[in-house]
Image (cartoon, grey):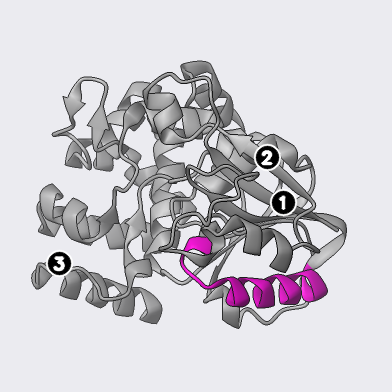
Amino acid sequence: MQNLKKNLKHANKILLRNKLDENVFMRIYSFPTENISGYIDYFDLKNRSLLTVGSSGDQILNAYFKGCRDITLIDINPFANYYINLKIAGILTFTYQEFQTFFFRWTEQGFNINRFNLDLFHKLSNNLKAIDYDSFYFFDKILTKYSKAKICDYLMNDEQSNSKIIKKFNNYLESEDSYNYLKNILKDIYFKFIFCNIFDFKSDLKFDNIFLSNLCTRIGIFELKSLLEKLNSNNLNENGSMLIAYLWDIDFESNEEGLDWKEIYRMPATRLYLKEYISEHHDVEGEYDILLDKKSKSDLVLVYKK
């Protein structure tokens, strides 16, 4: 309860001053900015363990959809745990269409004025209380006190808000049948949430798979290699796999220097510096491929196989 009060106070501070938190990681990602469906089958998840970053919760939901039953989420944002529990309660409660109405900022019909609708929130409340009462308490206080527009603008990160892309990026949202399949198995879901900066993660827990999402775009390549060395040594099982980087709109074989705003995009140097950790690379459909119905695959994942 002490942590809940502290987190609620922080959320109130953000919303009352109408100003984003200076820490970019304190915004809740509503949905992933990476094509999870595009890379998830390169990993053996069924009845295996997974450590993942990602505050939208969709890494967890897609992994569970694929048969993973031992999942640990690590995130520097304490709000992430509340939001993931909200999303799980929503799936257990809502129809496929109701889920989109409550969680999507944009639907196929246009801007969604019913996002975070209070009637729908009350509909999922009993399931949310059963899953995690702190998560219910947090969102009950936030959704009843502030306008939906303010919550979306200052607490959420809607970097990926196109409904077509959201559905394509997530196995469980690709169709009503997929959604209902997850709904039927989700009642038994359990995951561990670790509130921590992954660079400060000190544990000898071992995992079959580790997902680092697009963390590589937030840090330097030297920091990334140091993190990979630590996780490989301390936390990755023998014969384990690690998603070390998700990169947008890139050609792995290009000799270009790449986007100069992040070191990781300078692929010739990246290939050389991380050569012992790039076991595989896979092209996946990016958001523009999906939006424009292109046949190309412009995003890239780098995978380490131990």
For the residues marked 2 and 1, what is the alpha-carbon distance in whole angstroms?
8 Å
Magenta stretch: includes residue 234: yes
Label 1, on which residue? Answer: 303
Q: Amino acid at mark 3?
A: Leu
For the residues marked 1 and 3, what is the alpha-carbon distance in whole angstroms?
39 Å
Q: Check disc 1: other Cα within 10 Å, few if <14, some if 14-19, many if 20+.
A: many
Q: Are marks 3 and 2 in contact (CB under 8 Å)?
A: no
Q: Amino acid at mark 2?
A: His
Q: Quadrant of the C terminus?
A: bottom right
Q: Which mark is residue 282?
A: 2
Q: Are marks 2 and 1 in contact (CB under 8 Å)?
A: yes
Left/right placement of residue 180 relative to residue 162 reads: right
Q: Amino acid at mark 1?
A: Val
Q: Position of residue 92 (x, y in %)?
A: 46, 35
Dominant secondary structure (helix, strand or loop) of the stretch shown in magenta: helix
For the residues marked 3 and 2, what is the alpha-carbon distance in whole angstroms?
40 Å
Label whose residue precedes the other's in the sequence (2 or 1): 2
